[in-house]
Image (cartoon, coloured by chain):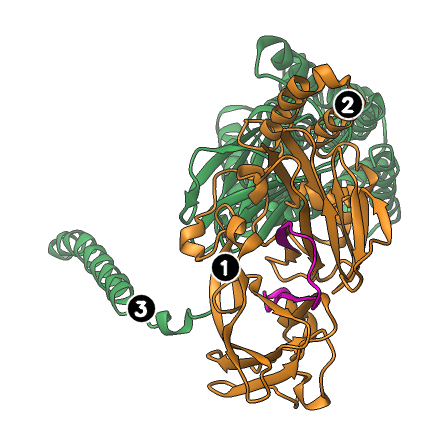
Chain colours: A orange, B green
Amino acid sequence: MGSVNRRRFFQRAGLAGAAGGAALVGGKKLVSAESEHQRAGKVIVAQGARAAHGSAHGGQGAVGTVDHERNGFHPLEVLTDFDYGEVSKDVAGRTVRDYEFVVANKEIEIAPGVFFPAWTYNGRVPGPSIRAIEGDRIRVRLVNTTEHKHTIHFHGIHPANMDGIPGVGEVGPGETFVYDFIAEPFGTHLYHCHSHPLAQHIQRGLYGAFIIDPKKGRPPANEMVLVMNAFDTNFDGANEVYAANTVAFAYVNDPIPIRKGELQRMHVINVTEFDPLNSIHLHANFFNVFRTGTSLEPSEFTDILSFVQAERHMVEFTYQEEGLFMFHAHQTEFVDLGWMSFFEVS
Amino acid sequence: MATSVRNRKSVPIAIGFVLLLVTAAVGLFKIFDATVSLRESPPVETLAFERTVFDEGTIEVQVRNDGPDEVIVAQLLVNDSYWNFEVTDRELSRLETATISLEYPWEEGLPVVMSVVTATGITITHVVEAATLTPDADASTFVTYALLGLYIGVIPVVFGLFSFPLLKRISKPWLGFFLALTIGLLVFLFIDTVVEGLELAGETAGSLDGVGLFVIGALLAVSGLMYLEDFLGRRKSGVSTSTASRGLVLAYLIAAGIGLHNLGEGLAVGSAIAAGEVALGTFLVIGFALHNTTEGLAIVAPMGGEQGRPSLWHFAGLGAVAGAPTILGAWIGGFLFAPAWAALMFGLAAGAVAQVVWAIGSSMRGEMSLSRGLPTLGFLTGLVVMYGTGLLVA
């Protein structure tokens, strides 16, 4: 979007997405409703909200559906498919996790019918969610099949020669490099390409989750990775599509199924380019915040959390009622442009 | 005799041969397209938004693919929000049109920005500065547009014609002043029409070549009016002995030129209301009316120097020729507006005005010559008057 359009939008923020506004009011209503009537009311209101965002004519949202099979990844699977690598032990008895990341150009459908010329790690955006335990040895072999130079730069603690920046661990077309380091500290981290121009290499899709569990472990929970990303489809330096895990409105068409009463642990990572800030807001609930996932005790109890670029946090929450619950960025213009989702609690 | 027969036969044969050659050349180019190897670059996707119709809670947009490559309509952004829509044809090849319709709670007087997001992620944006209900093409709006045309076109021109008795009583140099004033008015109109016309030409779908249409319109008007002048002149000199003939012919020519210009003016007003891009107030109508009164003066000026008075029917005729096209223009603008049509019509108007300036200029000789003092003053006064009354419309 040009800056003029953006300005226009801010002038009339209330006009756009009247359906979104209505749905929001509906969501708020749920909280204050009497508990006896709550369940029935919730389902009706939430479904109404979903209809307004879904395929109903005249509402907000994208028209049609994305062919996830052609993309090769489904946002519902991206949530939970942690990649533990090929596990072995070295002579010292330390756990070694081996990965192969292939950088390839790939056209992906990020909104129904809208194709983006992405750069991918292993054919998907976001790339594989690396999962390890604090102290494990990580070995990632990077293979570059493209015409540009690329790297993997991990957020974590590692030697300078493993940093994955221009000139250090950067691989040209057809070349390979092995990143070899110890996973620390525990927390919710990320990796991304650090070749220049930097914004271009990130916004094209070269990023992913890097989750390090504490040695002591954490209480059992349903764990999910949510990468908040966006796409500048017309390459004008501003995003046309916003999403959670790449596909606009993906969790509106396919709400995330979760269980009532079960602890939910979500690793939320912001890789949005061009906008300095993104956020997550849960409807009708609050969550515990573990900043950068680097502590075992929560530091905050809230229903909205902000993230600058590359900022990530671990959040935990539990739904005590069944129904559809909305969650989305509270930059409402991102909502209008695709960053809108639902949990379906059963 | 034998030669002419051979010639007559050989003309169609020659034409046929040339056509055959051209067809063959085009065919060969299509088969062995040399530019294919150059087309590795991304597709050039463009859409022209030709008509936007606002109804209660709904918007309908007609788009045309005016680029060289196919355009696939994937999503629609309305005021920076993805919005549900229906489209008659999602995949548009060159020059194909489609209608996008959506339910949207648009608000009167506020801007609506629509962007088509294509399959490749390109956004093609159309801005409506102020949304307003598009009038239905029913009888009452038809009459409203006609009245509007009457107000800004016919009535002021007729008022201007009333200056005829005054023109009868003045001396030759002063008549020169008024003729030169007319030229000044028309030169201003010419510039105005060219600027507006080229602006509209720019909005035309690229492959329809708005500037080309404008130029064709202009040349059509010039050659048409030259023919008309010649035809009327020959008829008058042959049949009638009226001494008013030369002036009357010129008056009709000016009326026709101004009429074509007013067609464009009506088009501008009608389409502005229909497109919802200008909130047309009484002020605009008053401005146009004052502006057009001077056009009536321009029409009668060449008859001032001649003996006698043409019949009142001629005055009615002149008023109708010059003013009535405004009504037609308002109808076309209101109900059928497309920038391509407008470019052509503004071209016609520009050509007509230019031709009329030439005709009046060549009729001014001796004491009325444009290089004399009073006529020069008249010319400059014409420009200033037009500028002044134009301020009322701006």
Q: Say whether marks 3 and 1 touch (CB < 8 Å).
A: no
Q: Quadrant of residue A168?
A: bottom right
The front one of A256 and A214 is A214
> What chain does badge 1 belong to?
B
* Residue type indicated by callout 2: Lys
The front one of B287 and B168 is B287
Which residue bears the numbered disc 1? Answer: B44
In this rendering, position of residue A299 left or right of residue A263: right
Q: Which mark is residue B141?
A: none
Residues at marks 1 and 2, CA–CA distance in whole angstroms: 48 Å
Q: What segment carries the magenta color?
A: A203-226
* Residue type indicated by callout 1: Val
Residues at marks 3 and 2, CA–CA distance in whole angstroms: 64 Å
Q: Which mark is residue A29?
A: 2
Q: Is residue A160 visible?
A: yes
Q: In front: mark 3 or mark 2?
A: 2
Q: Quadrant of residue A189?
A: bottom right
Q: In front: mark 1 or mark 2?
A: 2
Q: Is residue A211 magenta?
A: yes
Please name the residue shown 59% across and 49% down the image.
B124
Which residue bears the numbered disc 3? Answer: B33
> What chain does badge 3 belong to?
B
Q: Quadrant of residue A58?
A: top right
- Above-or-below relation of B292 to B200: above
